[in-house]
Amino acid sequence: MSFTLVFTEQYERRAARFLKRHPALEKQYLKTLQLLEANPFHPSLRLHALSGKLDGLHSVSINLSYRITLELMIRDQEIIPVNVGDHDAVY
């Protein structure tokens, strides 16, 4: 069962800024998105629900330092990325 990634304009701007600052992470970032689309529950993504002010969102790991926060809509098979960056930037 695959999911569909739905990119908002706001996220695309954030991702472009992130990749401009961290060009060495582009390959890992794209691999994370591909894996997220194929199987968001893959153990290497370390998918987990967030709480507090980010309640209702989830997070996946690009690597140990960088994350993508997202809305995970299981019912509609859609994943909407919200933010990308290091731990402090996305939380």
Image (tube, rainbow, N blue to C red):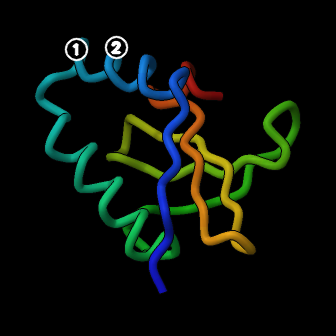
Q: Residue at x 42, y 63 (%)?
A: 36
Closest to the observer, 49 or 9:
9
Residue 39 position by quadrant = bottom left
Q: Is residue 17 left or right of residue 41?
A: left
Could you say which is closer to the camera, residue 2 or residue 30?
A: 2
Residue in the picture at 67% in, 49% down: 71
Q: Is residue 13 above or below residue 8?
A: above
Vertical placement of residue 35 versus 11, above or below: below
Check residue 50 in the rendering and tell me which mark sits there, or answer none: none
Quarter of the view holding residue 45: bottom left
Amino acid type, residue under disc 2 in the picture: Arg
Looking at the figure, which quarter contains the C terminus? top right
Residue toward you, 63 or 70? 70
Give me the disc on residue 17.
2
Report x, y in % for residue 19: 25, 23
Crowd class of label 1 (few under 14; some 14 to 19; many from 20; radius 10 Å): few
**Circles 2, 1 touching at the beta carbon (< 8 Å):** yes
Q: CA distance from mark 2 to mark 1?
A: 5 Å
Residue 59: x and y in percent read 59, 49
* Label annotation for residue 20: 1
Secondary structure under tag 1 reads: helix
The structure residue drawn at horizontal position 61% and vertical position 46%, both measured from the top left corner, is 70
Graded by Cα atoms within 10 Å as few (under 14), some (14 to 19) or many (20 or more), the crowding at tag 2 reads some
Is 65 placed above or below 19 here? below
In this rendered view, identify the residue nearer to me: 16 or 41. 16
